[in-house]
């Protein structure tokens, strides 16, 4: 199935407020101190993210840092909108990026590829001349309900229904290194930082993208089963339809989180994770607060793009 023509999609953009990294360090440190027994926030030159444990498709998060949200959960309702298949390769040039861009994040998977609904952990260097790491999908095995993780071929750049992506030129540069261990509050790693953005930047729009490693512990994650044949009308219907799992570290997550912008109907945080032990999915929260350990690298975006926003706004909330 061909993806939608990117040039015909509705595209809006907003300039993001780019806080100095020192300022974000202060904002996040204060919030982490209320939710974790141990934590640190440092401003560092990004490590080579191509290396283990992150194994991303490019080394860094620098260069035209862009936060992109496409579609939304509304396209699952009441029955799936099968036409909502996109291609980041043709969309990237429309959001200020060349074909050499590095794209990571969370999205609905390219279901036509396996003829089954799936989650996508996007991790691609578009137009990469050399073999490198690439995106994964996770789907539900129809026979036994287990989740299955699969590596996508490098030329499969489609996604479907919704996406929260971070685009850059993959260049090295200064990033925020955030470490947290043993959760003592109710907010997990990403929720802690996202809520800190909301409370600190009340009149500014701020968005970050990046990656984190769940080093120790387990996390609640969902994987969408194949499309529902009965209508999904409410958030309760959606949660009943999803398959939830308790997945084990180490998990490598990619995605974005933003402060807020009510009229764009945003998913304020969205991370998908993959692993080298067959597990992967949409991250909700760690389920082992006493032993959980996180390590992440993030950078603030300079511009935000909203593509193909559903015209009927019925947000499912952050998850
Ligand atoms: Zn998701």
Image (cartoon, rainbow, N blue to C red):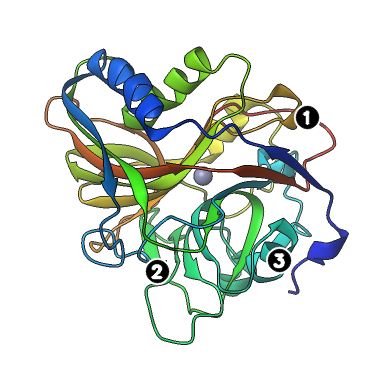
- Label drawn at residue 313: 1
> Percent from the top left, x then y, of residue 22?
35, 29
Picture residue at 55% right of the left edge, 26% below the top: 259
- Quick one: label 3, few (<14), some, or many (20+) residues within 10 Å? some
Residue identified by numbered label 2: 57
> Percent from the top left, x then y, of residue 137?
46, 63
Query: Whole-Å distance between the Cαs marked 1 and 2?
Result: 34 Å
Q: Is residue 45 left or right of residue 122?
A: left
Residue identified by numbered label 3: 93
Q: Is residue 315 left or right of residue 209?
A: right
- Quick one: label 1, few (<14), some, or many (20+) residues within 10 Å? few
Query: Whole-Å distance between the Cαs marked 3 and 2?
Result: 19 Å
Q: In this view, does 103 lie above or below 72?
A: below
Label 1–label 2 contact, CB within 8 A: no
Check mark 2 vs ligand 1: CB closer than 8 Å? yes or no.
Answer: no
Residue 247 or residue 120, whichever sits in front: 120
> Percent from the top left, x then y, of residue 162?
64, 48
Q: Please tell me whether mark 3 sits on a helix, a strand or a loop.
A: helix
Q: In this view, does 213 lie above or below 89?
A: above
> Percent from the top left, x then y, of residue 211?
36, 49
Mark with earlier residue (1, 3): 3
Picture residue at 65% right of the left edge, 57% below the top: 160
- Label drawn at residue 112: none
Q: Please tell me whether mark 2 sits on a helix, a strand or a loop.
A: loop
Query: Whole-Å distance between the Cαs marked 1 and 3?
Result: 27 Å
Q: Quadrant of residue 284?
A: top left
Label 3–label 2 contact, CB within 8 A: no
- Quick one: label 2, few (<14), some, or many (20+) residues within 10 Å? many
Q: Please tell me whether mark 1 sits on a helix, a strand or a loop.
A: loop
């Amino acid at each position: 199935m061909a993806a939608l023509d990117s040039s015909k999609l509705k595209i809006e953009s907003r300039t993001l407020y780019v806080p100095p990294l020192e300022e974000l360090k202060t904002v996040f440190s204060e919030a982490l101190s209320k939710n974790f027994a141990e934590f640190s926030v440092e401003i560092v030159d990004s490590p080579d993210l191509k290396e283990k444990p992150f194994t991303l498709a490019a080394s860094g998060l620098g260069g035209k840092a862009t936060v992109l949200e496409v579609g939304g959960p509304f396209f699952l309702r009441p029955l799936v909108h099968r036409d909502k298949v996109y291609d980041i390769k043709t969309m990237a040039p429309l959001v200020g990026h060349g074909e050499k861009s590095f794209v990571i994040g969370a999205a609905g998977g390219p279901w036509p590829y396996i003829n089954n609904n799936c989650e996508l952990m996007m991790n691609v260097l578009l137009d990469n001349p050399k073999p490198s790491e690439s995106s994964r999908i996770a789907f539900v095995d129809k026979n036994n309900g287990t989740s299955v993780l699969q590596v996508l071929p490098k030329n499969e750049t489609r996604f479907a229904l919704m996406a929260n992506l971070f685009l850059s030129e993959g260049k090295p540069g200064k990033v925020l290194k955030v470490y947290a261990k043993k959760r003592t509050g109710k907010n997990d790693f990403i929720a802690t930082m996202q809520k800190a953005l909301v409370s600190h930047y009340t009149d500014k729009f701020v968005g970050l993208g990046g990656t984190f490693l769940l080093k120790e512990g387990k996390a609640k994650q969902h994987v969408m089963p194949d499309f529902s044949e009965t209508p999904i009308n409410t958030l309760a219907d959606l949660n009943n339809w999803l398959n939830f799992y308790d997945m084990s570290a180490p998990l490598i997550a990619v995605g974005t989180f933003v402060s807020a912008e009510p009229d764009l109907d945003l998913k304020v945080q969205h991370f998908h994770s993959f692993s080298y032990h067959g597990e992967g999915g949409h991250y909700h929260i760690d389920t082992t607060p006493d032993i959980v350990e996180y390590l992440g690298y993030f950078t603030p975006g300079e511009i935000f793009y909203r593509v193909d926003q559903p015209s009927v706004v019925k947000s499912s909330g952050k998850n």
